[in-house]
Every structure is written in C-alpha cells, then in structure tokens.
C-alpha cells in the first residue's frame, strides 16, 4: 500500500494492490467508501428494483444444494469439451474478450421490441456471441453449462452496518447457443 499525502489541495491518495480472493468487487467498493470522510449509500450502484425477499430467501435455502451440485460437478462429472475449456496447462496466456458497451436505454428499447426483459436481451447477446466465437474456432457445441454467482448481500445504509464478507448463491443452467439474435431471444 502506498500513501501519497497532499495529492491535491486538502486530499491524500491511497494506492494498494490486493488479490481478488480477499473479497469481491462490492466488498472492496464498500471498504473504500468507508475510508471517505462522508459515507453516502446513494453513491453506490443502485438497481431500479431490488430482488424480491421471496427470491432472496429461495436462493439462500438452495445455496447448500447448488454449491454441493457445483462442487460435485467439478469433482466427478465430465467437463464440457469445447474451445472455451482451458487446456489445464499453465502457459501464462490470458484468454479474455471485451464486448461493445450497451447503454440501458438501448437495452430497454430492444427488450420492448422483442417483448422480453433486459435480461432476455443480454442472455441472447451472450448466446450469439459465444456461438460466433465457437464457430470461429471450429467448435460445433450447441450449449454450454453455466454456473452464475448471485449476490445475496444488501448494501449497508451506514458504515457501521458494513461487513467484509461474501454472501452469494449460485444458479446452474444450460445456455443454448444460437446463430442469430432473433432465435436466441
């Protein structure tokens, strides 16, 4: 960690590097918020509608089963055979991609046009994008198995309510890969 005192008029700067295993992105944001002079919950990412209490309770109750399912899957079940699967060799090569940035009004417009939700539009985009990538790499897979982490954490209203913890469950599903957006949605 490095401290740069008097970085700007009346302000100092803290620079630090930490491995992601210490906490997830939200935990770090909240920790950094706690270092500010004035903690304000309004500065954090707000969703238009928080997940329902029923949905959060359901995921909390399913957490032992979905986590066990995922754990057993890693231990005993055969892995997907596709071009997305890492070879297992540690070669230092980073595999990643960056997509086009879609603004919320565009996603809302597309969801209304296709009589769906914003999530439907995003999943359709992911399905088609992964399919295009796989076709480019001569992979004819029709679907992939997905393990999606879902945060069960509530944003604290005050800094005293903040807890540095990970509280999540997982959703396991198979994502069908489609050739075009209209059939994916």
Image: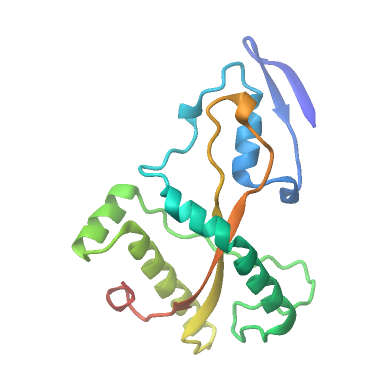
Residue 49 locus on image (x, y percent): 36, 44
> Is 64 above or below relative to 175?
above
162 up-or-down from 146: above or below? above
Taking depth in this image into account, of 105 and 149 the one nearest to the observer is 149
Quarter of the image for residue 69 reads bottom right
State the image coordinates of residue 114 (x, y, percent, origin top left).
22, 66
Considering the image in quadrants, where does the C terminus appear? bottom left
**87 left or right, relative to 115:** right
Q: How is the image coloured?
A: rainbow
Q: Is residue 76 left or right of residue 115?
A: right
Question: Which residue is at 26% across, 60% downward?
Answer: 111
Q: Residue at x 54, y 72 (%)?
A: 146
Q: How many marks?
A: 0
**Which of the two residues, 17 or 33, is positioned nearer the viewer here?**
33
| Front position in the image: 76 or 65 | 65
**On screen, residue 73 above or below 66:** below
At a point 68% along the width and 65% down the height, the residue shown is: 94
Q: Is residue 71 visible?
A: yes
Q: Residue at x 66, y 32 (%)?
A: 31
**Residue 33 in view in this figure:** no
Task: Tell whether 120 sits left or right of 150.
Answer: left
Question: x, y percentage for residue 112?
Answer: 21, 58
Q: Quadrant of the N terminus?
A: top right
95 relative to 160, above or below = below
| Residue 20 % position (x, y) | 71, 49
């Amino acid at each position: 960690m490095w401290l740069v005192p008097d970085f700007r008029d009346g302000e100092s700067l803290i620079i630090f590097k930490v491995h992601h295993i210490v906490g997830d992105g939200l935990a770090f944001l909240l920790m950094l918020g706690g270092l500010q002079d004035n903690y304000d919950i309004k500065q954090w990412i707000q969703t238009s509608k928080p997940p329902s209490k029923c949905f959060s309770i359901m995921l909390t109750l399913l957490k032992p089963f979905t986590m066990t399912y995922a754990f057993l899957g890693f231990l005993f079940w055969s892995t997907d055979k596709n071009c997305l699967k890492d070879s297992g060799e540690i070669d230092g090569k980073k595999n990643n991609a960056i997509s086009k940035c879609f603004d919320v009004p565009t996603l809302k417009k597309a969801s209304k046009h296709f009589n769906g939700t914003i999530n439907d539009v995003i999943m359709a985009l992911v399905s088609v994008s992964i399919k295009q990538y796989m076709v480019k790499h001569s992979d004819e897979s029709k679907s992939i198995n997905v393990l999606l982490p879902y945060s069960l954490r509530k944003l604290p209203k005050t800094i005293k309510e903040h807890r540095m913890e990970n509280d999540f469950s997982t959703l396991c599903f198979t994502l069908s890969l489609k050739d075009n957006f209209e059939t994916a949605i």
